[in-house]
Amino acid sequence: MSKIRIAIAGVGNCASSLLQGLEYYRNHSAEALAGLMHPSIDGWGVTDVEVVAAFDVDRRKVGLPVEQAIFARPNCTKVFQRALPVSDVLVEKGPVLDGVPAHMEDYPEDQAFRVSEAEPVDVARRLRETGAEVLVCYLPVGSEQAVRYYAEACLAAKVGMVNCVPVFIASDPAWAARFREAGVPIVGDDIKSQVGATITHRALTRLFGDRGVKLDRTYQLNVGGNTDFLNMLERSRLQSKKKSKTESVQSQLDSRLEDAAIHIGPSDYVPWHNDKKVAFIRMEGRGFGDVPMELELRLSVEDSPNSAGVVIDALRCVKVGLDRGIGGPLEAPSSYYMKSPPLQVRDSVAHDLTNAFIGGASPKLPRDKVVGGKPAIVTTASTRRPDGQPRSALILAAGTGSRLFPNATLPKPLAPIQGITLAERVIGTLRRAAGIERFVVSLGHEAETVRPHFQSVAARNGVAIEFVQADDWAKGNGASTLAAAEALADGPFLLSMCDHLYDDELPARLVEAPLPQDGMALACDFVKEEILDLDGVMKVKAGDGRIAAIAKTVGEWDCADTGVMVCTPAIFEALSEAAAGGRHGLADGVAVLASRGLASIVDVTGCWWADIDTPEAVRLAEEHASADELRAAG
């Protein structure tokens, strides 16, 4: 197998730990040792990584082979793998810009940076010349200009980026769009260590919330003796770092703390600590009966190996993104590995999404949907193609998925089937099989988590996307549908539940069928024996090709609602009429149209479909997905 060719910006302690680790695991069985979250990521092992370029500004490192430079002062991290293979990769001088604070000159040479007088190289050119695929950015905190320089170099050279620094690139919408347009993946921003202060603080914060304890105030103080802590003595460089660490913890709260009630940040530089970092966390809250409680924690770690254990995953995920043709922020790995990702979710959710990504989510965008290296996003006011078929679709993604996830740890649209989320599967099927170009997504539960995922899916699939907020989503899926009335007022549209999967033939049959004027058409399956959940399925009584009755408790019934239909805007009036009578289900609106003879049935018997509502349904859907992939490969 070929190697993942990486470049490193900043040959400091973190780079030292990473390079030592590459050789350490080469000499030991990665599967049998501690320290790795994923021994293999899409077939890429830890030993499949090689350094082809390195950049620094310190005179004791520039010009040295990288395997020697990582042990040069002021590096002070623990040496756990002294013997390294000889390479011909020399450390080259990058641009200084704002990477070295002035106060470094006030400290002894063996503790601080000393800038080389060599001329800086053109980093983008060197990335191209060395064939680098991924750049790992390890620049000092506060290096705003310098980090942006390396980000520009990555874009110019089409090199993926792991941004370990609290300079906001992946989480900045403008930068994210540029990486997406260039087809360059990035994981960022600001690395979360394996078991560091931030991820521990996040976990405890979430624990308080999950156990019903009200967190009133908290702090996190950190001390260390490496150049990172020396650099951060200059408080003007801390704005983004403090924001990154604070927001990372705030994101785990159901209700934000007031600024005065939370303090998180580096506190002081203790030279004799070297690369040891000590964190002090205090949390004060109230439990049952408003009775106060306090928690204090002291965490001591070797800072740089703690970081390397995460970077080794992040850089391999970027390589996977390159292999799959994905541009822009890799949102799942960014959420799991970084303090300030584009999408903040619980770490347990990020863990599941990252494993889904590794397992195959976010497939490569088809080439016919790429224009000028970026997705061709179609925007149009019309919802009906010249052939009479709808071009817009409404996806209902507001529910909790409580049967599938009793503890509601993962929003249902983000649930993976063979590594691809329900959201991505539904959009991909409707775009491919029904020619849908514009999607309206109705959001409710965990909207702030679900929305960014749909945005990324839409970008990868080359479709336009809009969102509506269903404030009354908990009343029923009829309320979630009504929220889209204004967005879909000008013509027919396809409607799909986000948690229903189906093969391409089902929506293809549906959109080709006649549609009653001012009515709707529902895709129905007449084979009851193959329905997994007879109690939960929406049952339909048929009469002369139309819906005579629809409910979960119909006495005599003929077919099952597959969760996919074509509607005219008349459905919104019908839903409003039903809601006025206290009925808030989508089926209640369909029943109103059915009573007027305006709800037809499209027979899709023989098409595969499933309501992904239980673990058993997930298992069957994954078996079907695997069989489909085997047929496609054959």
Image (cartoon, grey):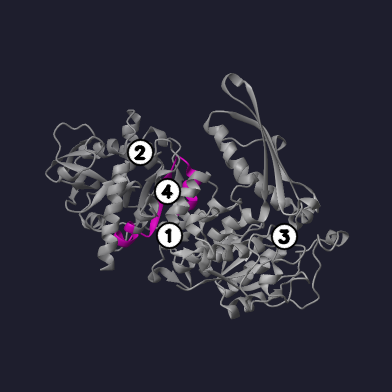
Q: Residue at x 43, y 62 (%)?
A: 42
Q: Which residue is mark 4?
A: 414
User: What kind of residue is marked 3?
Assistant: Pro
Lower sequence index among marks 2 and 3 = 3
Is residue 357 placed above or below 293 in the rendered structure?
A: below
Q: Relative to the observer, which residue lies in front, 521 or 499?
A: 499
Alpha carbon of mark 2 to alpha carbon of mark 3: how far? Answer: 50 Å
Q: Which residue is mark 3?
A: 140
Lower sequence index among marks 1 and 4 = 1
Q: Relative to the observer, which residue lies in front, 281 or 72?
A: 72
Q: Relative to the observer, which residue lies in front, 400 or 497?
A: 400
Alpha carbon of mark 2 to alpha carbon of mark 4: how far? Answer: 18 Å
Query: Is the Cβ of the residue at disc 3 closer than 8 Å to that at disc 1?
Result: no
Alpha carbon of mark 3 to alpha carbon of mark 1: how far? Answer: 32 Å
Along the horizontal axis of the image, is 77 left or right of 338? Answer: right
Alpha carbon of mark 1 to alpha carbon of mark 4: how far? Answer: 12 Å
Q: Relative to the observer, which residue lies in front, 325 or 135?
A: 135
| Residue 144 visible (yes or no) | yes
